[in-house]
Amino acid sequence: MQQSAYPAGLTTTEATARQVAEGPNELEPEQRRGFSRIAGEVASEPMFLLLLGAGSIYLLMGDLNEALMLLAFVCIIMAVTILQERHTERALEALRDLSSPRALAIRDGNAIRIAGRDVVRDDILILGEGDRVPADGHLLAAHELSVDESLLTGESLAVAKCAAAQDERGNTKIFAGTLITSGQGIMCVSAIGAATELGRIGKSLQSIDNETSPLQREIGELTKRLALIAGTLCLLFTALYVAIRGGWLDGLLAGITLAMGILPQEFPVILIIFLALGARRIAQQRVLTRRLGAIETLGETTVLCVDKTGTLTQNHMAVAALAVDGQQFDVTNRTALEVLPEHFHELLEYSVLASETEPLDPMEQAVHRMANEYLANTEHLHTDWNLTREYERLPDLPAMSHLWQVPGRHLQAVACKGAPEAIADLCHLDAAQTAQVTAQVAVMAERGLRVLGVARAEHRSGTFPDLQHDFAFEYLGLVGLADPLRTEVPGAVEECRQAGIRVVMITGDHPHTARTIAVQAGIDDSRMLTGAELLDDKNIVAQIAGVGIFARVTPQQKLRIVEALKARGEIVAMTGDGVNDAPALKAAHIGIAMGRRGTDVAREAASLVLLNDDFGAIVHAIRLGRRIFRNLRQAMIYTLAVHVPIVVLSIMPLLLGLPLMLAPIHIAFLELIINPACSIVFEAEANEEALMRMSPRTPEERLIASSHIILSMIQGALTAGVAMLLYWFLLNAGRSVEETRGLAFVALIVADSMLVLSSRSLVAGFWPALRGLNPASYWVLGGTALALLAVTRQPLLAGAFAFTPTAWRDWLIACLIGCATFALFEFTKACAAAAVLARLPVTPVK
């Protein structure tokens, strides 16, 4: 279909006005949460219900000031939490907008790519193979168009579609959500959004993947266990308090304080914030995350399967050489005034005829460019010929043919191009001729060229053969196309190697071409297999061991290779772009679709989408995935550790017969430190160079292992011990309860701040913990220091916290005691590292 034949479509002004009047083309966005919904969810969190319960008890006890202060903290914490949730939701909305289907619309007479949600009624859309139809409408033109309507009808077979002028059986309509499996078409939109057939039956293609990931399951299990412990200890502690001191309201208040200290409500929040903001960071590298669970899998990747064209190479093809009868015309070495010898004209002529008239394929675009340059003003360009029949490339015959009606003659010209071996087969070349072609292909492929064979035939009958083999093809020659390697690829491949990730090339190209590009990229070329050499499914698992290059591979064989790699225990990431790649993309642990040249169905099957089709972006995404997992682990270790002193300092004073140190308002203050520290400081931690020099983690490796829990418990116990000893010492020294509580609280908060610094790295030492502080660290630690000064030094606030302001000397000593815990934390990490090393097997020196 020529672009000149497209209807003019709407103007931009008309489309904008229609969208304002009728709304965007999307179904009810149930997954999007507004401000009121987020506020309602936050208000129903157990932590806030406990805070409100504590405030109610203070009112019952007649302590209005304490109740109002606690209510103020509830409002502050809710505001901070809602802002964090809203920030996360905006990140998710941005990702949803990016991942929505795209549409090729005619606006102002030009074909432009727009988001599916921007389609309006009466838009003219161009449909191609692999597109997801964004709206309901009727066909204006169609060329061998078939549509998968199983989403609506349940029928697995594709339905052939025709334009209104071609069909009277009702197959002129096309529906939102269906998939173009072959051919092309032009449609006029008649219904959008909820008015479509898909909208009326209440299904949505825009929903986010809700499958629970391993990380979500692990954190969910840990949260349930800690919540159960919190509830049990709350009841026991309340009963113990009443038994020892009496006063059930005071006992209930003490129990609520303990429950607030244990309740791990931060865990699920931290996870979703890290994944959502991590996906946003990856999106800044032009990699779209369609499934948040893929982020955690990135760090486990052991094999990266990549296509050659457009991923390793620039996808900017140019004809580099033509070969006819053993003679070769080298385009790259020609002079500016050199003309194409007549001997090569027919080869280039039929290369154009075997290509689409308005090509999207980079190779066909390169052929057209060369023909327009060398064959202009000759009889070899046929703008007046009409295309009457196409034979598509098949898995068992990688060649395609076009039949052209020659004006004024009862003759059809047949042009064919494809893999050289397929062309040799179609031309029925004998062994000697085939060997000659093979030798010429090898010479061109050694230069890294992608080689196509070209043939011609004539057809005089009025009926069309069913198979390309039925034409009497004449072999014309070879076309060699160059696609330069991307400059960043060798460095990225080397980075993968250092990270323990094996890069495997899977391509449909000739083996020589594949090997040349692999060597340039740094991919292991010691073992290579072609699609024809792949064994059956039982033996392929053993056969592919150590293979770095798969050449002449069909999309169906890609799926077999991915499944075989998975059967070997590999964690597989794979790139793809076409409809036939979708099964392999879905089968891989991480499917990576091409954003520019990929089809909608490939993008929907994938977990990640490369918006720039850039191999370097894949490696960067893996690096960010490892960083996100590392930072998430450090945040969880800190969160566990920081809850321990709250529990200890709630229980120990009661057991020792001392006044209680912590009240609900103190826990609320701590929450204002814990949440920003976890979701801001740790999430913003930068990459460590060592991350990409480590082996991929195994799927069995837990986010929080027993060693991490033990480290958290010890660090939390040290924090609690320092604060409790100071509290006990000052009370025995005759200081007032309010003064003592304030100084112990200063030591506790400063120690928690030191724990933030220490938890930035599992490596022991002052330098690893202090170097490279991100700006968020300064803001959070500075804000904590100012807030601590306010609640311990300002008389009105100090009174609300049951503190008495003390002399500056005492306040600074308490700060120094809290800072001293930093050395204890680093000593603990050093001991933990030594214990791990002691458990490793020792290999004797021979």
Image (tube, rainbow, N blue to C red):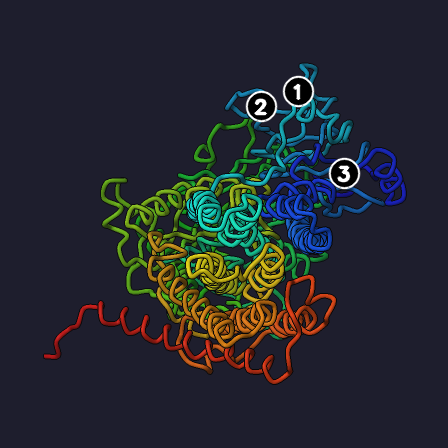
- Mark 1 Cα-neighbour bin, 10 Å: few <14, some 14–19, many ≥20: some
Q: Earlier in the sequence, mark 2 or mark 1?
A: 2
Q: CA distance from mark 2 to mark 3?
A: 24 Å
Q: Amino acid at mark 3?
A: Val
**Marks 2 and 3: which is nearer the front?**
3
Q: CA distance from mark 2 to mark 1?
A: 8 Å
**Marks 3 and 1: which is nearer the front?**
3
Query: Contact (CB < 8 A) between labels 2 and 1?
Result: yes
Q: Can residue 117 be seen from the camera position used here?
A: yes
Asked which secondary structure carries label 1, the reply is loop
Image-quadrant location for residue 556: top left
Residue hosting label 1 = 171
Residue hosting label 2 = 159
Q: Position of residue 247 (x, y in %)?
A: 54, 46
The residue drawn where x is 56% and y is 51% is: 269
The residue drawn where x is 51% and y is 23% is: 157
Image-quadrant location for residue 130: top right
The label on residue 119 is 3
In the image, is 450 to the left or to the right of 431? Answer: right
Judging depth in this view, the residue of 65 and 298 nearest the camera is 65
